[in-house]
Amino acid sequence: MPSGFAAAKVFVRNRFAAEHRTPPHDWAHAQRVMAWARRIAVAENADDEIVRWAALLHDIARESKDEFTSDHARDGVTIARKILRRFAPHTNENAILHAIAAHSRRSNILPETLEARVIWDADKLDGLGAMGAERYIIQGSELGWDIYRSARYYIKTINNHMAGRGFYTATAKKIAAGRVSEGLAVCKAILRDEI
Ligand SMILES: [Fe+2]
Ligand SMILES: [Fe+2]
């Protein structure tokens, strides 16, 4: 059986395809989080192996309908552990699983390591900008919301996020600055045309 990160990537991509993941949490989201995480990790001197595995597996248990009902970060740890043992038995399992457990706003586990903070920041960056606004609007429609309700939810969530924990690393804080206003502007423009 193939092992290693490349094989695990194929496994996760196929799993997401079989689950018919939609843009809020599909393979492309995982890829963008991997790319943000790598960029932040390089700048912050975080452990590349921990960060790339955690980014790949962070939403392994995510479903759009779970928005208010379950803790996919905690649920994802169990699945991620099995995948890690199958594809990369020699990796730093505990550090990877901690980063996954602590990446969600609904999780009451705070990121205690630099690598977990990198994953939090990378995932939250994909919630900003026009990309983030579009992901929220699609997810809202999956929850049965109209576009105005989704836009309001986005504005509230991002404002709460920035007034609360925001971002941990200096690198992500710098990247986030312009993207916060971009995502909010998209949703404000939608509400400007509300009927
Ligand atoms: Fe997540
Ligand atoms: Fe995510």
Image (tube, helix red, strand yellow):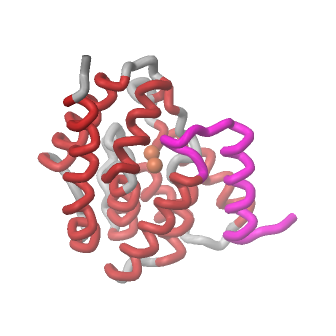
Identify the image quadrant of the N terminus: bottom right
Looking at the picture, how far across and down is residue 182, in whole percent? 25, 52
- Asked whether 147 falls inside the magenta stretch, the response is no
Closest to the observer: 79 or 148? 148
- Which residue is drawn at the image coordinates 32% and 53% (left, top)? 129
Residue 136: image quadrant is: top left
Main secondary structure type of the part rendered in magenta: helix
Closest to the observer: 5 or 126? 126
Horizontally, residue 114 falls left or right of residue 58, namely left
Number of marks drawn: 0
Looking at the picture, how far across and down is residue 81, in whole percent? 61, 53
- Which residue is drawn at the image coordinates 56% and 65% (left, top)? 53
Q: Up-down: is 161 above or below 70?
A: below
Looking at the picture, how far across and down is residue 145, in whole percent? 39, 19
- Asked whether 13 falls inside the magenta stretch, the response is yes
Horizontally, residue 99 falls left or right of residue 130, namely right
Per the rendered image, the range of residues in magenta is 1-27
Horizontally, residue 33 falls left or right of residue 163, namely right
Which residue reaches farthest right?
1
- Which residue is drawn at the image coordinates 53% and 42% (left, top)? 23
